Image (tube, helix red, strand yellow):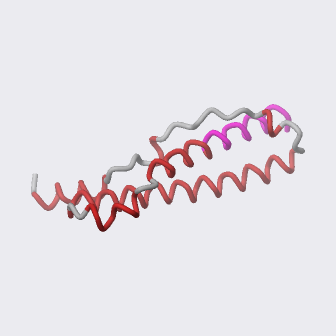
Amino acid sequence: MRPAFVILLVVVSGCAIHPGNILPEPVSARPYQALSCGALEAALADTREQLAAASKRQMDQRTVGGIRNATKVKRLFGIVIDDREESRSDVARRKGEVGALIRELDRRC
């Protein structure tokens, strides 16, 4: 392999997990049982937006981690990537909430 390709691969891959590889956190549909079908659909749309934002933050963490790996400038990016675990758990929680909302919509609406 060419050295430039290896460096590019490291930069793109980063340290953080790709949002698509993060498993959903188990979330009960119980809190959503009192909502109407319209309220469930609105909550699902809102939660999907929150998931998209959390996934973007996770991807940003991957990019910053990759740059940090490639440049070995850990102090400069250390503050920026400190919350990568928080981003990962936020993606997992949002995925679980989307699943719970879809289950409740399928069950009742």
Q: Choose top left, top right, bottom left or bottom right for residue 9.
A: bottom left
Residue 40: image x %, image y %?
Answer: 81, 46
Q: Which residue is drawn at 56% across and 48% down?
A: 90
Residue 56, position as x, y percentages in the image: 50, 59
Horizontal relation, residue 52 to residue 34: left or right:
left
Does the stretch in magenta take in 41? no
Q: In this view, does 57 lie to the left or right of 36?
A: left
Furthest-left residue in this view = 2
**Residue sitting at 43 percent across and 57 percent down?**
59
| Rendered-image quadrant of the C terminus | top right
Over which residues does the magenta segment extend? 95-109
Q: Quadrant of residue 67?
A: bottom left
Query: Where is residue 104, by image quadrant?
Result: top right
Which x, y percent locates residue 31? Answer: 80, 38
Please name the residue shown 27% across and 61% down the image: 74
Query: What is the count of numbered marks?
Result: 0
Q: Nearer the viewer, residue 4 or 22?
A: 22
Q: Which residue is drawn at 85% across and 34% down?
A: 108
In this view of the protein, which residue sits in the foreground, 15 or 7?
15
What secondary structure characterizes most of the magenta part? helix
**What x and y, as percent, mark residue 70?**
21, 60
Question: In the visual, does 93 lie left or right of 71?
Answer: right
In this picture, is 18 found above or below 56? above
Please state which of residues 84 and 66 is positioned toward the viewer in this rendering.
84
Say left or right for 93 vs 84: right
